[in-house]
């Protein structure tokens, strides 16, 4: 029907059913109206040493240079000991919105007084999670004064252990909502997880020694100062900060996709955290921070929410995600989140270093030029040669690639 609707040729229809390393029946159980599979390159980032352990980090991403940049940054972090970090307890927030409340302060008091009962009710919905040390842990209440009147917003804090947690949390908030309505004297409206996971944070640090940052064209000191100036612009300019944080998420989302994690949730969490942390009067803050040590080395750090899981969801059903998890070899969500934060920091450091020195296009263009050569019809072995010429000429265009190819064929 789709082929008929869109006028697909026979070859195009065949392509739909032939592009997957994953059985379409598996995909068909994941979402609705499946007509095929969409492939992304799956790569591994190398050189990552996190908390004294070496990893090959699977990344699924379509953007050239990202994997190379992360791998290179991880290599530069190794002389300083690699990445060190941890994650806080995996506590997610579920929200219940309460409306038509005559006395918000009284409602708040009554809800808090029943905290223990409410937690028990929530935990009765997921006894297994409770048994392994997770489950609903705390109730918080906020009162919002809005143009549509006061709203009481209840937060249920749930330790979701190794799950991403959306299902567990959503089930729990739906379960306690009627009781919250009764206690508040109003009615419950929205009952849903918050992606601003301020209690589930990853913290990672790395030292990049000035010696390792030096190259033929740049002294280590220049690179350190250059990265500090680049970071500072992000800290003071929201227009730059958006791009700075986008670079961080290039790495994190690529690992999230490869491991079957919800990258939209991570993106939402990261960018809203960057806004939340910026504080009064500011729009957004960088997810990373760069400083200089007394002996002139560069220290990078990252802090952001990391709502990732190693059990359940796509991670457990998608064969490629399962494979990626095996390559990564992590034992739980805390380890996965720490690695992902390390990749985000590496990615950001690589971007700042490139931007502060030779510019971003040089490395990017070499890979891009190869793609342009392939698009012009070059075989992979020819593509490397053509790419080199086009980069040296600073003429990375399909017409130039075709000309060069023609020359190769006639010479
Ligand atoms: C491109 O995908 C990401 C960068 O723009 C990040 C940055 O500017 O920091 C290179």
Image (cartoon, grey):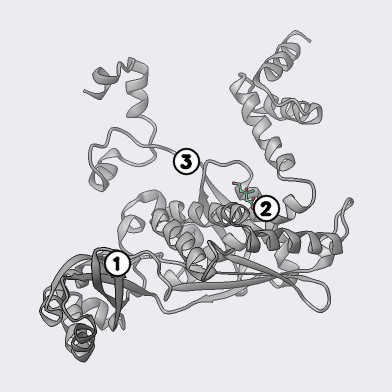
- Marks 1/2: CA distance? 41 Å
Q: Is residue 261 left or right of residue 69?
A: left
Q: Secondary structure at mark 1?
A: strand
**Label 2 beta carbon less than 8 Å to ligand 1:** yes
Sequence order check, earlier mark of 2 and 3: 3
Q: Residues within 10 Å of mark 1 (few under 14, many from 20)?
A: few
- Residue 176 locus on image (x, y percent): 16, 76
- Observer-side mark, 1 or 3, equals 1
Name the residue rendered at 74%, 55% in the picture.
353
Determine which residue is flagged by label 2.
Answer: 351
What residue lies at 66% left-to-right and 36% top-to-bottom? 367
Label 3 neighbourhood size at 10 Å, few (<14), some (14-19), many (20+)?
A: few
Label of residue 146 in the image: 1
Q: Nearer the viewer, residue 10 or 203?
A: 203
Residues 375 and 145: in front is 145
Query: Which label number is shown at residue 40?
Result: 3
- Residue 106, how many percent across, how many down? 20, 86
Q: Earlier in the sequence, mark 1 or mark 2?
A: 1
Foreground label between 1 and 2: 1
Which residue is pictured at 30% across the width and 72% down the height?
144
Viewport quadrant of the C terminus: top right
Question: Would you say residue 332 is visible in this rendering?
Answer: no
């Amino acid at each position: 029907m789709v082929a008929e609707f869109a006028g697909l040729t026979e070859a195009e229809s065949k392509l739909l059913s032939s592009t997957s390393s994953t059985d379409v029946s598996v995909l068909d159980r994941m979402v609705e109206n499946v007509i095929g599979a969409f492939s992304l390159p799956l790569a591994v980032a190398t050189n990552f040493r996190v908390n004294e352990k070496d990893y090959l980090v699977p990344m699924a991403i379509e953007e050239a240079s990202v994997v190379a940049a992360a791998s290179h940054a991880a290599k530069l972090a190794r002389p300083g000991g690699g990445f060190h970090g941890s994650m806080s307890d995996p506590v997610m927030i579920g929200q219940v919105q309460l409306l038509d409340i005559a006395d918000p302060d009284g409602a708040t008091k009554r809800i808090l007084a029943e905290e223990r009962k409410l937690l028990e009710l929530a935990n009765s919905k997921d006894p297994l999670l409770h048994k392994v040390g997770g489950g609903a842990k705390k109730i918080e209440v906020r009162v919002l004064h809005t143009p549509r009147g006061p709203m009481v917003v209840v937060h249920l804090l749930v330790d979701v252990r190794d799950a991403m947690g959306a299902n567990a949390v959503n089930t729990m908030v739906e379960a306690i909502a009627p009781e919250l309505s009764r206690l508040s004297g109003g009615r419950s409206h929205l009952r849903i997880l918050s992606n601003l996971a301020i209690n589930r944070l990853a913290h990672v640090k790395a030292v990049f020694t000035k010696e390792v940052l030096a190259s033929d064209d740049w002294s280590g000191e220049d690179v350190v100062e250059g990265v500090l100036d680049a970071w500072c612009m992000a800290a003071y300019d929201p227009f730059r900060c958006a791009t700075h944080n986008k670079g961080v998420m290039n790495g994190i989302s690529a690992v999230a996709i490869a491991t079957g994690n919800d990258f939209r949730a991570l993106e939402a969490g990261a960018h809203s955290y960057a806004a939340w942390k910026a504080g009064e009067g500011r729009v957004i803050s960088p997810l990373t921070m760069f400083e200089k040590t007394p002996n002139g080395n560069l220290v990078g750090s990252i802090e952001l929410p990391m709502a990732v899981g190693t059990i359940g969801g796509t991670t457990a059903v998608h064969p490629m995600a399962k494979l990626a998890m095996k390559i990564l070899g992590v034992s739980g969500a805390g380890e996965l989140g720490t690695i992902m934060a390390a990749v985000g920091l590496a990615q950001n450091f690589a971007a700042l270093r490139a931007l502060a020195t030779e510019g971003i296009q040089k490395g990017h263009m070499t890979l891009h030029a190869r793609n342009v050569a392939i698009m012009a019809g070059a075989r992979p072995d020819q593509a490397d040669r053509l790419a080199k010429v086009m980069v040296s000429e600073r003429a990375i265009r399909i017409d130039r690639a075709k000309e060069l190819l023609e020359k190769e064929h006639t010479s």
